[in-house]
Amino acid sequence: MLKKFLAVLLMTTMLTTILPGMSEAASYHTKAISVAKANMGVKYKWGGITPAGFDCSGLVKYSYGKAGKVLPRTAGEMWGKGKRVYSLQPGDLVFYKTYASAKPTHVGIYIGNGKFIHSASSKGVSIAYLSNSYWKPRYVGAKRI
């Protein structure tokens, strides 16, 4: 009986230590997606980092900043952060190479169901499918922040 009690106590302690961190991660990912979605339709502006106009990394930096996470300014610098993931979850950053470069040149936020939100030069802040004929061959990978 004492062993069962100690096992339950240990499990409870572990869960109360782990779960708050997990909910924090879930909440800032959700918040970043909400901020990005609230800016749907904002025009593309090269170098833009505000709702007056965003480029791709400006939108991601702004959205995560409003969620309490500081990210670097460019897609290439963001690629150096976080943990590489192969099974996407909402809030993961998805990276693309849109021209010849050593590092990714485009970034968006995965929102689930095979879609990501980003600021595209052609449409501004919009949602696209990972399987889109333009984006799919340019996909580099994803990072979890």
Image: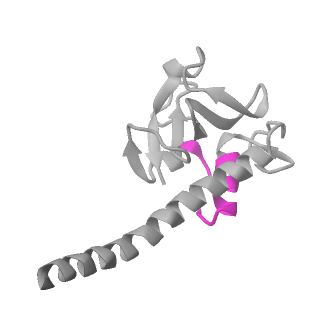
Which residue: 53% across, 28% down?
A: 97
Q: Quadrant of residue 90?
A: top right
Q: Among all residues in the image, which is located at the extreme right? A: 52
Q: Quadrant of residue 63?
A: bottom right
Which residue: 65% across, 62% down?
A: 67
Compared to 14, does 56 lie above or below? above
Compared to 46, does 137 lie above or below? above
Would residue 72 be visible to someone looking at this image? no
57 sits left or right of 142 in the view: right
Part of the protein shown in magenta: 58-75
Which residue: 53% across, 31% down?
A: 96
Which color scheme is applied?
Answer: one colour
Q: Among all residues in the image, which is located at the extreme bottom? A: 2
Compared to 68, does 3 lie above or below? below
On-image quarter of the N terminus: bottom left
| The magenta stretch spans residue 71 | yes
In percent of width and height, residue 128 lies at 66, 27
92 sits left or right of 53 in the view: left
Q: Nearer the viewer, residue 5 or 86?
A: 5
In percent of width and height, residue 123 lies at 79, 28
Which residue: 46% across, 39% down?
A: 88
| The magenta stretch spans residue 129 | no
In percent of width and height, residue 45 lies at 80, 39
18 sits left or right of 71 in the view: left
Q: How many marks?
A: 0
Compared to 86, does 64 lie above or below? below
